[in-house]
Amino acid sequence: MARLIRVRDGEMEEGAMSQAIAWNEDGTLKEIVGNHPVVGCSMRVGSITAGTYSKRDWWLTTEVTEILEEKMEGDLIYVKFKTKNSVYEFWGGDTSLWAETQRKLKHKKL
């Protein structure tokens, strides 16, 4: 599972799909390079299948310009990153660890 949160307003998307997407110069898909944020790639997070009856099935960011913070603990990865338009927090891995890790991050214990 993955969770993507836009910091400025708390808007969020989550789901089993998590892809760092590289693009060709003409804007077509070049390759999927991983499952967490990578500088130069867009992040897509959400449902693997369409039709979830929510307001959207996935979220695609603009290209990542900078990794601001990256932490790993067990099966959980946390990445705070900047795109051309926004700052995001990405959580990937074991969803049962999210709440505890968020608490630790707030108290700088991770």
Image (tube, rainbow, N blue to C red):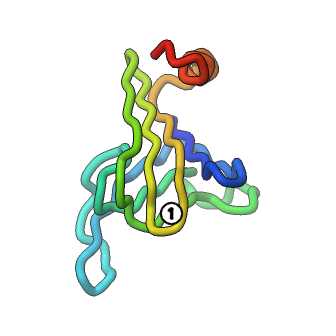
Instruction: Name, please, the residue furthest toward the front.
Output: 108
Residue nearest the viewer, comparing 89 with 52: 89
Residue nearest the viewer, comparing 39 with 2: 39
Instruction: Name, please, the residue furthest toward the bottom.
Output: 26
Residue at image position (56%, 25%) is 95
Residue 15 place in picture, x, y as percent: 57, 43
Residue nearest the viewer, comparing 3 with 48: 3
Dot 1, crowdedness within 10 Å: few (<14), some or many (≥20)?
A: some
Residue 33 place in picture, x, y as percent: 25, 53
**Dot 1 corresponds to which residue?**
60
Callout 1: helix, strand or loop? Answer: strand
Q: Quadrant of residue 31?
A: bottom left
Residue at image position (38%, 65%) is 63
Horizontally, is 99 left or right of 17 in the view? right
- 16 vs 24: above or below: above
Q: Quadrant of residue 70?
A: top left
Horizontally, is 92 left or right of 64 in the view? right
Q: Quadrant of residue 57?
A: bottom right
How many numbered tags mark residues here?
Answer: 1
Residue 37 place in picture, x, y as percent: 37, 48
Q: Which amino acid, by three-letter code, is at mark 1?
A: Leu
Residue at image position (40%, 37%) is 69
For the C terminus, give its image quadrant: top left
- 89 vs 51: above or below: above
